[in-house]
Image (spheres, rainbow, N blue to C red):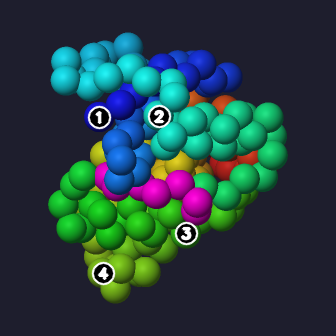
Amino acid sequence: MHYLLYTSPVGPLRIVADSIGLRQLWLPNEVAARQPDSSWTEDANHPMIKHVVETLNSYFAGEPVSFDHIPCEPVGTEFQRNVWAQLRTIRYAGVISYGDIAEQLNNPKAVRAVGGAVGRNPIAIILPCHRVLGRDNTLTGYSGGLDVKKALLALEGINYKG
């Protein structure tokens, strides 16, 4: 694995990638609490990392970017990967509810399980879990902290309740 510490307006982010794709994108609280595996290599020139950095630079400059062109390979259960695939469908400045995701997975009673999977998303921002709100457009929890979620929503011009 290759990684880079990226300085963003919401704090430091750690980008983790390999030859297959983006594996992880740690939010500031994760960067503070975790260390890269000793077998990983810090590498700002890794092609995938450079690609992600260019995209994040555009995103944080306020450009309405799509993350579709970034190959993502998160590790998780089949259910988690299915939820994360749904996150990928949320367009820039769009929102979805946990219930909507459960319905898209043909499992409308799995709202809490969807919430758990969203909270374990290993590729923040690129798999835009910050765009998931409560059914009535309310601000819900965020594993990266509500301040980070609010900042990302504000960057995209997304309005929410509470």
Dot 4 or dot 3, earlier in sequence: 3
Which region shows up in magenta?
Answer: 68-74
Closer to the N terminus: mark 2 or mark 4? 2
Q: Which residue is mark 2?
A: 46
- Cα separation between marks 4 and 3: 18 Å
Q: Amino acid at mark 4?
A: Asn
Instruction: Name the spot of residue 6 as percent of width and height, x first.
Output: 55, 23
The kind of residue on which mark 2 rests is: His
Residue 43 found in image quarter: top left
Name the N-terminal-most of marks 4 and 1: 1
Between marks 1 and 2, how big is the CA–CA gap? Answer: 10 Å
Mark 4–mark 1 CB contact (< 8 Å): no
- The answer to whether marks 1 and 2 mark residues whose Cβ atoms lie closer than 8 Å is no
Mark found first going from the N terminus, 1 or 3: 1
Specify the amino acid type for callout 3.
Thr
Q: Is residue 106 magenta?
A: no
Circle on res. 89: 3
Whether residue 87 is visible, yes or no, is yes
Which residue is drawn at the image coordinates 27% and 61% (left, top)? 80
The residue beneath circle 1 is 1
Task: Quote the CA–CA distance across marks 2 and 4.
Answer: 39 Å
